[in-house]
Amino acid sequence: MARKKRNLLTLGAIGFAILLFIILGIFQTEKSHKTIALAHEGPGSGTPSIGGIFELVDMNGKVWKDTDFKGKPMLIYFGYSYCPHICPQALSHMTQAVEELGGSRVIQPVFVSIDPERDTLDSLKGFAQNFHKDFIMLTGSKDQVQQALKSYRVYAAKASENGGGNDYQMDHSSLIYLMDKKGEYVAHFDHQSPSDDIVKRVKLFLENGN
C-alpha cells in the first residue's frame, strides 16, 4: 500500500514537472515572438525602426530638422562632450572615415548630444574643434533631445553624481548609425569599429547606387 502511494506521488510529481515545462515553454515562445517583432518593426522587411522626427539646434544656433538631412547619407552618433573615452573614440573613427570618404559632399557626419544640461552651444563649439570640420554638432532642450533619442532608439541616463551639480557621467548606448538619403537605417557600428570598416561599409552602400 505504501509502495503504491509512493508511486502515485512520484507520477504526480512528474506530471506537475511536465506541466510546468509546458507552461514555461509557452511563455518563452511568446516572449521570443515579442522580441522578434520589436527587432523587425520598421518600414522594410527585417529592418529595425531607427531614425525619424527630431528638431535640434547646432553650435551656431541654427535649427536642424530630420528633413534637412534628406538627400545625402549620414553617419550619426549620440554622445556627450564630457564623455571621457567612448564618445571621443567613436567620433575619432568617424572623423577618419569621413575624411577618407571625401567629407560632407559624400556623407554627412552628425553628433547629437544626450546631455543638454551641459552641452550648451559654446561647449559644443570647443568640442567640435577636436573632430572633422564637417561635423554638425546638435543639442536642444530636454524634450527635443528625448524625441531624437526615441526616434533612434538610443538609451541614455545619468550614471552617477559625485557631489551633485555638473559632476556626473552618462550611461548610454554607443552606436554609429549609417542612414540613407531618405533618413532610413542602413547599418551600424560600435565605438570600437575601425575607420577602415566604416569606410568599406559606406563605399559598398554607395556603390550599390545609394
Image: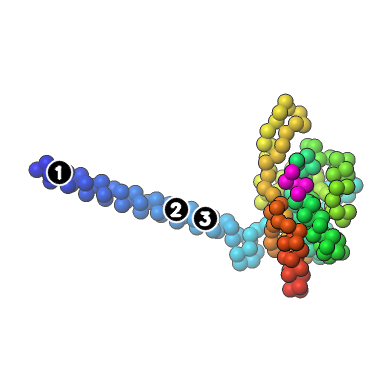
Q: Nearer the viewer, residue 204 or 75?
A: 204
Within 10 angstroms of label 2, few (less than 14), some, or many (20 or more) residues?
few
- SS at badge 3: helix
Whether residue 165 is situated above or below residue 137 in the rendered picture: above
- According to the picture, the residue beneath numbered tag 3 turns out to be 34
Marking on residue 35: none
Which residue is located at x 26 percent, y 50 percent? 15
Which residue is located at x 76 percent, y 63 percent? 199
- According to the picture, the residue beneath numbered tag 1 turns out to be 5
Within 10 angstroms of label 3, few (less than 14), some, or many (20 or more) residues?
few
Between the C-alphas of marks 2 and 1, the distance is 34 Å
- In front: mark 1 or mark 3? 1
Amino acid type assigned to the residue bearing label 2 in the image: Gln
Q: Residue furthest left?
A: 1
- According to the picture, the residue beneath numbered tag 2 turns out to be 28
Amino acid type assigned to the residue bearing label 3 in the image: Lys
Instruction: Tell whether position 174 is magenta.
Output: no
Which residue is located at x 75 percent, y 47 percent? 87
Q: Point out the image quarter for the N terminus.
A: top left
Amino acid type assigned to the residue bearing label 1 in the image: Lys
Give the magenta-colored segment's residue range.
Answer: 85-89
Q: Residue furthest right?
A: 60
